[in-house]
Image: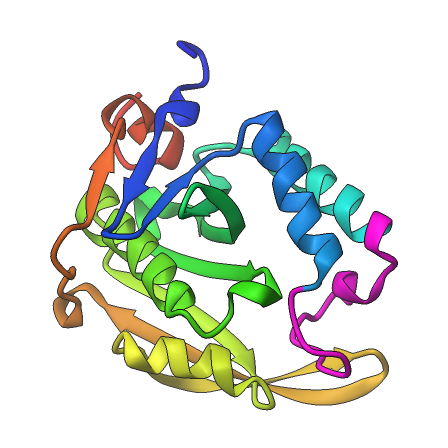
């Protein structure tokens, strides 16, 4: 798509493909959301979207992507990829930036269909967007964060080399909860073998990573 080249952007790893979703991909991603993304009783998200009814989760997932596309600008963008494993959409991995041309800093967020947990996919898909950020876009830093009672997400960050960057208190459904902030420098990052970026060049101005 000439006027929206982001649909041609892909990041591939030995097992995964990350891409902006087609409408069929969004349907599949909505199905993953409806099936569930975490064990009952866990509260990994500040906005409790995963607590809704299955049909609500599916519809909200689709609407979220529409909103992100419509709000995109080089000054503030959120790039929510779908993650494809073994030919099926299994989750989503986002990369976001604000005033990236100046800050050269990105943040990330993700979720994975519950039946695909425990396969190392979460670590591999985060590594994919770190490769895009550091080697494709020229980021200097990547940040992340997770509630203190979300050890799985924190383990992914630490496995990839993030270090502590402070604590923030959030209101989670009326209760205070600690968010542990994490930060990774490009100087501390090494991309694993077999990671590739495709179709990035025409997208760079949309990320604020090159002159328009």
Considering depth in this image, is 97 or 46 the residue closer to the camera?
Answer: 46
Residue at screen point 73% across, 38% down: 63
Residue numbers of the magenta segment: 37-55
Q: Residue 112: horizontal and vertical position, in percent?
A: 55, 61
Q: Quadrant of residue 87?
A: top left
| Residue at position x 50%, y 32% in the image | 73
| Residue 54 left/right relative to 202 | right
Query: Residue drawn at (49%, 75%), measured in percent from left and top?
Result: 145
Q: Is residue 51 magenta?
A: yes
Instruction: Where is residue 41? Give x, y as percent.
Output: 77, 83
Q: Quadrant of the N terminus?
A: top left
Q: From what the image shows, is residue 7 above or below residue 41?
A: above
Q: Nearer the viewer, residue 198 or 175?
A: 198
Q: Is residue 13 above or below residue 174?
A: above
24, 145: nearer the viewer? 24
Q: Position of residue 101 (x, y in %)?
A: 32, 42
Q: Is residue 171 left or right of residue 21?
A: right
In depth, the one of 157 and 107 nearer the eye is 157
Visible residue check, residue 169: yes
Residue 149 position, x and y percent, is: 60, 90
Q: Main secondary structure of the magenta part?
A: loop
Q: Is residue 104 visible?
A: no
Decide if residue 44 is on the left or right side of residue 150. Answer: right
């Amino acid at each position: 798509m000439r006027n929206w080249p982001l649909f041609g952007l892909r990041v591939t790893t030995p097992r995964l493909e990350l891409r902006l979703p087609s409408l069929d991909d969004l349907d599949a991603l909505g199905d993953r959301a409806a099936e569930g993304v975490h064990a009952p009783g866990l509260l990994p998200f500040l906005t409790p979207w995963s607590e809704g009814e299955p049909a609500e989760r599916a519809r909200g997932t689709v609407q979220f992507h529409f909103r992100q596309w419509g709000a995109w600008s080089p000054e503030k963008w959120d790039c929510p990829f779908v993650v494809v494993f073994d030919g099926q959409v299994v989750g989503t991995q986002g990369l976001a930036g604000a005033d990236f041309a100046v800050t050269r800093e990105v943040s990330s967020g993700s979720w994975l269909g519950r039946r695909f947990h425990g396969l190392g996919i979460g670590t591999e898909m985060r590594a994919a967007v770190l490769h895009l950020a550091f080697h494709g876009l020229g980021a200097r830093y990547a940040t992340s964060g997770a509630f203190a009672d979300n050890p799985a997400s924190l383990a992914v960050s630490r496995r990839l080399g993030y270090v502590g960057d402070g604590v923030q208190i959030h209101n989670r459904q009326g209760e205070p909860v600690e968010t542990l902030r994490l930060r990774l420098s490009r100087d501390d990052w090494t991309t694993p073998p077999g990671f590739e970026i495709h179709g990035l060049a025409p997208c760079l101005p949309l990320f604020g990573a090159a002159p328009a």
